[in-house]
Amino acid sequence: MTTDTTTKDTSPGASAPGTTVLDARGVTMRFGGLTAVRDVDLTVSSGEIVGLIGPNGAGKTTFFNCLTGLYIPTEGEVRYKGQVLPPKSFKVTAAGIARTFQNIRLFGNMTVLENVLVGRHTRTKEGFWSAVLRGPGFHKAEAASRERATELLEFVGLGAKADHLARNLPYGEQRKLEIARALASEPGLLLLDEPTAGMNPQETRAAEELIFAIRDRGTAVLVIEHDMRFIFNLCDRVAVLVQGQKLVEGDAATVQGDERVIAAYIGEPLENDPGAAEAAEVEAAEAAAEATTDAAPGKENDR
Ligand SMILES: Nc1ncnc2c1ncn2[C@@H]1O[C@H](COP(=O)(O)OP(=O)(O)O)[C@@H](O)[C@H]1O
Ligand SMILES: [Mg+2]
């Protein structure tokens, strides 16, 4: 943790290290007959980066949606800094929780800077419609907002792209822009849903550095990701969801060594180079496919 407390480097949503920021208790979410999330407890303290992993369909995104007011949990309670969260997304954002989405949601025809300015509307008196319609109150707040948004773009490494249209950014930069927009609401807790999906290894490493920097500014982070190396490098604590239930929670060593996790999800211990194991698997699969190409034409080109 940094001890730097200058206002420029510290998020206004920051609180003393070790304070419980998020406290989710007994969260259950049912869709008709399907229980997507079952009785999940999870806390995140300030200064922490917590990971949430689990197979596809385990309920990770649904759990995020329960934390951000997108869904009202069927059972259970979610508190942010001790207060029960209101069941509306914009009120949750105003309270101090920001998120990014598994499927990027940017305003493609707005500039990069404008996307961040939209993210600030919960923190300016003028509000969303004023920002869109540019009413009289807007211009007064505009200069300060622009300055802050520009700082955030520099922070995520998009300073030079402020005037580009969001839709023209490469994929990895769109993910960074989503993070900048989320940070614009000055959150005490940032939820990231698969932030490195579709990124190349260099972009993934840069994302890792960015998330450490966000934590160091005083914003706690809860992150869903499939990339195990990324998660175990990054997180102080990792919780594993399987079929909607929390199977295990602990530090990287605890989770990686847990036989139930290995059986349910990882498949093998991660002591060695997981990238190399994957590469070997792909090679083996390719060799096998080649051997059967004649018997099964058309399968080799499905990427
Ligand atoms: N809005 C919804 N209505 C019905 N079922 C849903 C809805 N959202 C998610 N589910 C189901 O809940 C389960 C968990 O999904 P999800 O939270 O997206 O998993 P994950 O993010 O871990 O891959 C899945 O079986 C999914 O089909
Ligand atoms: Mg998901």
Image (cartoon, rainbow, N blue to C red):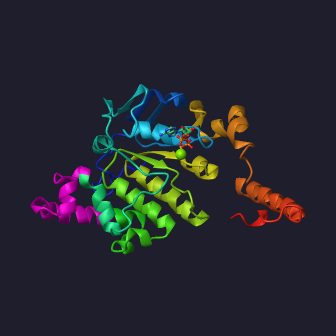
Is 153 positioned to the left or the right of 146 in the image? right
Please state the horizontal and vertical placement of residue 285, each as a whole percent of the image: 81, 58
Is 32 positioned to the left or the right of 274 in the image? left
Q: Residue at x 64, y 37 (%)?
A: 255
Please state the horizontal and vertical placement of residue 73, each as a whole percent of the image: 42, 30
Toward which corner of the image does residue 265 lie, by quadrant?
A: top right
Is 302 positioned to the left or the right of 119 in the image? right
* Residue 15 vs residue 160, the one in the foreground: 160
Q: Quadrant of the C terminus?
A: bottom right
**Boundaries of the magenta span:** 122-151
Q: Main secondary structure of the magenta part?
A: helix
Please state the horizontal and vertical placement of residue 54, each as a whole percent of the image: 61, 40
* Residue 119 vs residue 156, the one in the foreground: 119
Vertical comparison of 59 with 9: above or below: above
Is residue 137 located in the magenta-colored stretch of the structure? yes
Please state the horizontal and vertical placement of residue 170, each as a whole percent of the image: 49, 70
Is 75 positioned to the left or the right of 55 in the image? left
